[in-house]
Amino acid sequence: MQFPVNTWPETAAFPVLTTMTLIPLAAMIAVLCTRSLKMALQFGFVGTSLTVLLSLYLLAVFDAEVSGMNLVEQVRFAGMSYTVGVDGVNILFIPLTAVIAFLVLLYTFSHAKSRYRDRFYVASVLGYETVLIGAFVSLNVMQFWLWSVLEMIPVVYLTLHSGTGQCRRWAVDRFLQYWLSGLSMTLTGFLLLAFGLIDSEHPLTFDWLTIKQNSAYLHDEALIFVLLFYGFAVRMPLFPFHGWLPILAEHGTVASCMIFLVGLKLGVFAILRFILPILPGVAEDWAGLVLALAVLSIFYGAIMALLQINIRRLLAFAVLSQTGILVIGLFCFNNFGLEGSIMLSVAYGLATAGMLFSVGLIYERTGTAIMPRLGGLFDSNLTLGMLFLVSALSTLVKPGTPGFDATHLIIEGTIEEHGWLLAIAILTGNLLAAAFILWAFQRVFLAGSRRFAQPYSSLHHPVLKERLITAVICVLLVGTGFYMRPWLRLVDQDASMITKGYPIHSSMPHGPSAGSPQSGPFQLEEEQP
C-alpha cells in the first residue's frame, strides 16, 4: 500500500519544519558570538518565542483530515538524504518542545543564581531545543540517530555546569553508560533495517518512507525489534533500563525538565515511528514480554516513589511508572490505545513540566529537595503550590485535565485487546500515583516544617515571571482537558493507518475493525446521537 505523502508547498508558504529547526540553532550561534549576558538572554528569548509562534502556524496548516505525511521536505546530496515531515504521530510533540523551551528561558531571564547567569547555559537550552525538534521531524533513520547523539551534549553540559550536589560527574558517567549502550543498539538496528532492503529494487537507503514501504523484504526482523526496543527503552525509560534517570534527576537543574519531558517522550515517539509501522508483525509476537516489562515499570516505579525522601527522585520514579502505562497503550494494537498513548504522552509531559518547575523554584528558595526539610510552603509560595497541585492532578488523570480522556482511551483499548486484568493493573498504578504525588504535595506545601527557621519568603524572587509560567502551564492543561476534540482529530487518521498495518489484529472480526473508516475513537463518538 502506497503511503500518502504531501510536500510542504501544498499547504504551507515556506518549509516550516526546517525553519523551526534552524531558528533556535541560529539563536544559539548568536548567543555564542556575543559577550553580553543581557544580549544572550534576549537572543534566546527571541529564538524560543519565534519557535512557539511557528508551532502555532504548524498546527494551523496541518491537514488533520488527510492521513499520511504532511509538509514533507527532502533534499538529496552525495548519496544521502535530508527528509523531514509531520503527521499525527509527532504533530503535538513539536509545540510541546517549543513551549517548554520558552518557559525554561523565561525562568533563566529572571534568575539570580550565578550558575544560570552564563551565555553557554542559554546556548545549551537553545541547542537542546534544536536537537529535539530535529529528531521529532526526522524521516531518515540515520538523521534521527545523529540527532539523538547530539542530544547528549547539552544534557551533559547542563548537568555538569548547572546541576546540584557533589556527585554530578558520577551522574553524568552513569547517564553516558546507559545512553551510549542504547545508542549503539539503535544504530545496529537501523543499519540492519537499511541493509535488509538489499533484495528489493532499491539501493542502500536510510529513508524512512522507503524502508516502510518495502518492509516486506526485511530479514532478521526479530533481531531488529530487540535492538531498537532496547535502545528506545533506555530513552523512555522502561524498567529495567531506567538506572540513569533517578541519579540525573537528583543532580540536575530546572532546565533538565526538558530531559524528563520532551526528551523522554522521544523514546515513545521512536516506537511509534520506527517499530510499529515497520515491524508490526514482530511487535505483535513480542507483545507479551513488552507488556510484562510495562507492568513491572508501573508498580516498581510507584513503590520506589513511595520510598523516596528526595522529591526530585520521587518525580523520576513517577516518570518510570507513567512510561509503563504509555507502553501498554502502544501495544494494544487498536486505535483506542494508540491515540490514548499519544495524548497521554503530551499530557504527562506538560504536567510533569509544571511539577519540575515548581520543585526547581522551591529548591532555589530553600537550597534543598529533601521533603522532611521542607513544609509549610503553600502560604508563602502560593503560586508554586498551585502550579504543583494543578500539574499533579493532571498526572492523576482527573476530570478536566487532558490525561482524563487519554487514560480512558488506553483503558478501553486495553480491555478490548488484553482484558480486564491488565486494565485493573493500570488503574491500580494510577491509584498508587495518587498516593505518592499527593503525599509529596502534603509534605512540601502543607505539613509543618521540621526546620527551626523563619518561613520562606517570596521576597527577592521573580514572582511575576513565576506567575506567568504557572498561568501558561495551567491554562494549557485545563484548556486542553475540557476541549480534547480538536487534539484527538489531529492524531486520529494516522493512528488508524498504523493499526491497519498489523497482520493479525487488522484481520480480526471482533471489535472495531482497524480497516474500517469509522474505527477511530473520535469517529465512534460522532456516531452517537
Image (spheres, rainbow, N blue to C red):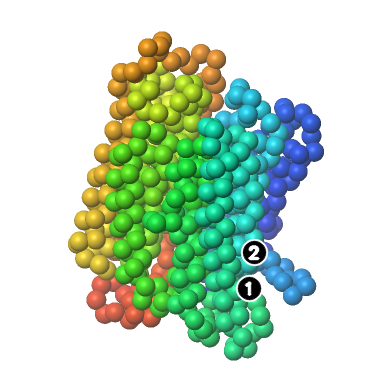
The residue singled out by tag 2 in the image is: 143
| Left or right: 414, with 276 as reference point | left
Question: Residues under labels 2 and 1: Cα distance?
Answer: 8 Å
Residue sitting at x 24%, y 55%: 425
Circle 1: is it few (<14), some (14-19), or many (20+) Cα within 10 Å?
many
What percent of the width, then of the height, locates residue 366?
47, 21
- Count of picture labels: 2
Residue 251 visible, this angle: yes
Look at the numbered disc 2 and give the secondary structure of its residue: helix
| Left or right: 203, with 481 as reference point | right
The residue singled out by tag 1 in the image is: 206
Any mark on residue 335, and which? none
What percent of the width, then of the height, locates residue 151?
61, 51
Q: Nearer the viewer, residue 5 or 318?
A: 318
Mark earlier in primary sequence (2, 1): 2
Above or below 68: residue 384: above
